[in-house]
Every structure is written in C-alpha cells, then in structure tokens.
Amino acid sequence: MKKNWRIHQYMKRFGPLLIVGVLIMGLASCDGSCSSTPAEYELNTSSSGGGHVVISGEGTYADGAIVTIEAVADECYEFVEWTGADVDDPYSPITTITIDEAKTITAVFALLSYDLTTDSTDGGAVTSPGEDTFAYDCGTMVPLVAAAEEGYYFVNWSGDVDTVDNTNAPTTTITMMGDYSITANFELVPPGQVVLTTSSTTWGSVTDPGEGTFLYDEGTTVDLVAVADECYEFVNWTGDPVADPNSASTNITMDADKNVTANFALISYNLTADSTDGGEVTSPEEGTHTYGCGTVVDLVAEADECYEFVNWTGDTVANPNSATTTITMDGAKHVTANFALLSYNLTAASTDWGEVTTPEEGTHTYGCGTVVDLVAEPEEGYNFVKWSGDVGTIADIDAAETTITMNGHYSITANFGFFAGGNGTAEDPYQIADWYHLDNVRNYLSSFFTVINDLDSGSIGYTELASTTAHEGNGWQPLGSSPPFVGSFDGQGYEICDLFIDRSGESDVGLFGVVGAAGIIENVGVNGNVTGYNDVGALMGKNEGTVSTSYSSGRVTGIDYVGGLMGKNEGTASNSSSASSVTGDTRVGGLVGQNEGASNSYATGSVTGSDYVGGLAGRNEGPASNSYATGSVNGDDCVGGLVGKNEDTVSDSYSTGLVTGTGNVGGLVGQNNDDDEVDDSFWDTETSGQSTSAGGTGKTTAEMMDIDTFTDTDTVGLDEPWDITTVANSSTRNTDYIWNIVDNVTYPFLSWQPV
C-alpha cells in the first residue's frame, strides 16, 4: 500500500511533464509530413494501335504506389514492348510500374504474320497462289484455285481448312488466322463418267447439287437450283449451256465435263418523297430515288417559316412523328411529310397612365406571320414612352402606333410616363423630346437625362412652359434651386432654343437654377432671352458641379453675378462657350460672372456692367486657363478684356475685344491682386484700345496672329510655350493640341471648337 501510494504521488507530480516530453519527442520525429496530405500523381497510358491498356485504379495514385498494367492485343496483333516510363518488365504484357512522379506509358503492338503452305496430289495443281510457302498478314483473305489435269477432277481441299470458304470448290478463299498447310486433292475420272463443276458469284449460292465438283454417268440430266441471298436476285447461269440460263431452277445434260456459274445482283427499289404545303423534304430531296435493297435512307423534313412539321404518312418510317428519321428500303416506298400553320398568342398590357386600345388589352391568337396593328393611348398629361417585353418584331418600339409581326408567342407592355423613354439610370436615362419632358426634370433632380432632339418654339409645351406668356409672363421656371440639380444632363449636341425667362426679382435664374456639386451638365446648347436678379446665366444661375461642351447665345440680363453661360461658377467649366450679350451691374462676364475654375473655353458676346466686368469673367477667384474672349467690354471700375478683377491665376489665355471704363481698366485684366499671377497671356493692343493691363502682355494684331508669340520663349511675356500647332485653314482641326492657329491669318482658337 505504501509503495502504491508513492507511485501515485510520483505520477501526480511528474506525470504531466512525462506527457509533454512524449509529445515533444513525437513532434521532433515528425519530418514535416505528419499533417500534410500525401502527394498524388497521374499515370497516363496509350497504345500504338492494335490493342489497349488496362490499369488497376482510377489513373491518379499516391506517391510510391505500385500499379499493375496489362497490354491487351486486338485480334491479329501481338504485344511488343512498353515505352515511355520505366516498368518492371518492358517486354511482358502484364507488369507493374512504381508511381513516384507523373508518368506516361505506351503499349506497342505489331500486326501478326502467318505462313500458308500449299501443295496438291497427283492429277492437278494449285495455280493460285501457287504451290509453296507464302507469308500473309493476319486476317488476309487469300484466293485459292485448284486446276485438274486432263482425266482428273478436283475432289476437295484438306489440311488446315477451318477458314476455307468452301472445301469442295476448286475456286475458293482461305482467311489467314494462323499458320496453315492445305492440299488440293484430285482423283481420276472413272470410265463412263463426266465431271460437273458448279460455283456462284457473291450474294447467292448453288444449292442443288451444291457447289464444287460432282461425278455423273455420261448422259445424266442434272437439276440445277440457285438461291439468292436476302436483297439479291438471281440473274442467269453462265459457262456451259443449261436448259434455261435465265431460270434459277433448270438442268444440264452431262454429255461431257461441264462448268456452270450462278450469277446474282442486288435488288433496287424506288423511294418517292413529297410534302404538303408549308415545308419540304430536304433529304433525299423530293422526287423519286433508287436505292439498293436494305439501304437505310435518312429522311429530313424542314418546315417553312411559320409552319411546323406534323408527321410522315405513307409507308412505314422509323419514327413517323420526327422530322428527322429513316426508312429501310425492303420494297418500293412512298412517304409524305405533313406540315401545319403555327398559331401564336399575343398578350398586351400597359403600365399606369394609359392603355393599349388596339388590339385591346388581353390575350389574342393569330396565325404565324400575321402583322398586328398596335395602338397605345396615354392619359391626359402623360406620354407614351415605349413598348417593352417581346419587342423583337415590333416595327418601332418608340411609336405609340406601330405593328408587331407574330413569329412567336409574345407578351408586350405599353409604357407611359413623364418622359419619352428611359428609367432615369445611367444605363437608360430619361429621354427628353419636348418641353413637358424638360419641365419634368425638376421632379427627378438626381436622375440621368438625355435630350433626343432640338427644342424650340414649335416643340410641344413651349407656349405653356417657356414662352413670353408662360407662367403669367415670367416664362420658364428654372430647374432646381433648393434643392439643386444633382443628376446628369446630356444634351447630346442638341439645342434648347427660344428660351424666355423674365424673373428680374429672383436669383438663381437660367435653364437650371443651381447645379449641385454632384451635378453634371454636358453637350447642350441654350439660346434665349434670360433676365434675373443675382446669379443669372442662360444655362444656369449657379454651378457647383461640372459643366462641359456646352454653349449659349442670345441675351442675359441681371444685377450681380451675371454671365453668358452661368452667373456664378463654383465648380468646373471646360470646353464651353458663350455668344450671349450680357448686361449687369457687378461681377458681369461674357462666360461667367464670377469664376472659380474654367478652362478651354471662350466668349464672344458683348459685356456691359459697372464693377468687375470682363470679357470672359467679371471676377476670377479660381484658375482660368486656355481661354479667350473677343467681345467688347464696357464698365466703370475693374474692367478687363478677359477678366475684370483677378484674385487667382490666369494662364495661356488672351483677349481681343474693345475695352472701355473709368477706373482700373486693362486690355486683359482690369485689376490684379498682388499675389496672383497672370502667366503667358496676351491682349491685342490695337483692337482693345488699351495699351496697359494689370496682367499679361500687350501685342499688336500681327503679333497675336504669329505662332512665335505663343511658342518662342524669347518672346516678351512668354515663359512656357502654349500647347499649340499650326493648321492649314480655319476649318481644320488638330485635336492633339489644345490650341490651333492659321499662322499670320487667325488668332489662336481652341481645337475642340466647332468649325
């Protein structure tokens, strides 16, 4: 008991340490593969032809596996060796291979060859192939001919005759499936007897008296019977004369040695194929065709458009309900392919705000190919948008009155809404085709829009929404102010013309009131007469988003922050222009009243104001680059051909318009803050009437048309050359450069400008 207690105490104290030690020793003895999956490799097998390979397993084996492989030769072939990877015995058809990597093994087989030895007894000889030993490939069918000498007759073949076609016939064949030795046997014809030799061509046989050589007493009449194989017919007897050479059953008189052959031929039958209306038999084509007995003929029936195959009628075919089937020619046959006209259902429905009036909503059945009139009518105040659903055969899915051709089962929906089409996503923007559609933008300020045609005074909704009488004489109501427009508006190059706005007591006035930071306006032109108070422009009153490739023309009037394209730009404007004449009080510009970021843009309209008046921008508080102005500028204080007052940077820009004012007047810039720069920019001292500027360098008209002014850094006022190149004429553009110029003919112009 005491000893056991001590053992217990020992194990209690040191047992855990012993267990840990055992675990550590076990881990130390692990070579890194203890927890890893054993490697597996593929064994690929092939043969040279003449046999195949049988392997144990599935083709993928664990590293170190020993796999049994067997080469199985086809008939007439023998195994030669294994090639490729090493095997245990490369010359044994059954051997093993050890898998220690991916391996490929090939079994090589060779065609067997056998000897045929022929000889004969006295009284004749083997004339084909002769008498000797001959080598043939396994499976070869060798012709045998035994010829008797005079006074002898052929009796039979003896020896290895298992594969001789007819051992009693002097003319026959032997198939070489081994080494064979055969003998042609002859005997003397007994006195008073004669020999009858019978044979046949392929596809039949002589059944009476059989085929071979037969002895008869001289003068005997021997019955002859020839029987044809299936699908063949007896033709005639040839050789020595018989009683009736054209009859399969006849006789021959044995007054001498005789030799006769029964001849056979393949029977032929006619197949006639035709069809009903609605299709045709394309194989073997319609008409009558001749085939050998037993031939299996493919039949294919093809329906015309709007028809379907029904069945085959007439003689029996393999599958009468399948357009593609077969018929076996065991007699004369006649088949007809039958077709029927298809019928299809048209289901018509509509969204809210309209209905399908023709053919009425619901399901209607029509014959295939029928052209069905479709008419969709919107409710008052709504527009037909488009047809959706199975629209592949609708003549014009965008037309409320159109047609659909019934080439299948179709379900269609007439869609109505506030726009000409689309769902307001980037992939499928709302489509604007009239003034009502444009006015509906205000209800979807964060959606995507495209203009699909020009709008003018003749477009639907103009009188009600954008004319001098609209909204009690105030004209168009700007889109988006509070909240602003934050969607995407793509004019696609179309123009919104004849816009009238007279809201002299309102701010944020233009086609759009305010475009928010996320808003995008592009590829649109605006023409009209726009009047407002502050933040006034033809395209928009204030921009906080992105404007590109847009333009304006007409007249813009306001008090503060007034511009031809936009009143105030707190976002970006690029590749845009204005030809609008602009009138205002403070911060008045040909393109923008106050700018915080404009590039690659220009203005050509006249500008009139009081303070901060410029041909491009009245007041510039952001970068202005690669831009120009050509319109006349008139004001009181801070008046410039390009910028009235600059509080940021101006670069690679110029102006040419007449500039007049009373204080802080400059050909390019009226007033420039001390810390702000005007770089590589110029004005025409002759056309502007100004010899000085708060920034930029004055040049004569000739110098302004000389490319060296803009590329030669030795030129006064040019530190860095412009991105400019010469072109042949003013109608030519080289868009690899920002600027183009016809040297000594034109001022620089932007390469994106319309011709």
Image (cartoon, rainbow, N blue to C red):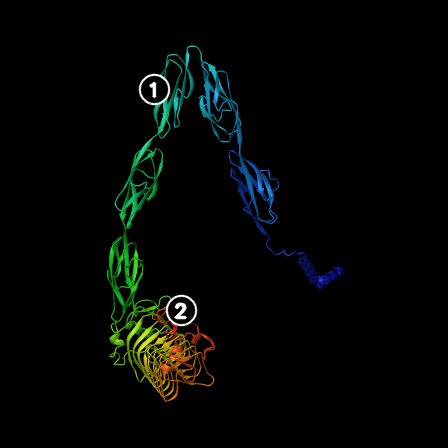
Q: Nearer the viewer, residue 197 or 332?
A: 197
Dot 1 lies on which element? strand
Using a 10 Å C-alpha cutoff, classify the residue at mark 2 as few (fewer than 14 neighbours), some (14 to 19) or many (20 or more). Answer: some
User: Of all residues shown, which one is farthest toward the right?
Assistant: 2
Does 747 appear above or below 88? below
Viewed as shown, does residue 734 lie left or right of 346?
A: right
Question: Judging from the image, what secondary structure is the residue with disc 2 in?
Answer: loop
Image quarter in which the N terminus is found = bottom right
Residue 484 at least partly seen: no
Instruction: Determine whether label 2 and label 1 are within 8 Å by CB.
Output: no
Above-or-below relation of 517 to 339: below
Q: Is residue 325 left or right of residue 712?
A: left
Question: Disc 2 vs disc 1: which is toward the camera?
Answer: 2
Instruction: Report which residue position mark 1 lands on.
Output: 250
Specify the amino acid type for callout 2.
Thr
Position of the C terminus, as image quadrant, is: bottom left
**Residue matched to label 2:** 735
Can you tell which quarter of the image residue 20 is in? bottom right
Viewer-proximal residue, 510 or 464?
510
The Cα atoms of the two marked residues, 2 and 1, are separated by 102 Å
Would residue 152 be seen by someone viewing this image from the given angle? yes
How far across and down, in percent of the image, does residue 575 sit? Answer: 38, 73
The x, y position of residue 542, in whole percent, is 37, 79
For marks 2 and 1, the one nearer the N-term is 1
Outermost top residue? 191
Q: Which labelled disc corresponds to residue 677?
A: none
User: Residue type at mark 1?
Assistant: Thr
Q: Nearer the viewer, residue 328 or 12?
A: 328
Q: Residue furthest bottom?
A: 662
Q: Quadrant of residue 700?
A: bottom left
The residue that appears at 29% across and 50% down in the rendered structure is 305
Q: x%, y% of residue 591? A: 36, 79
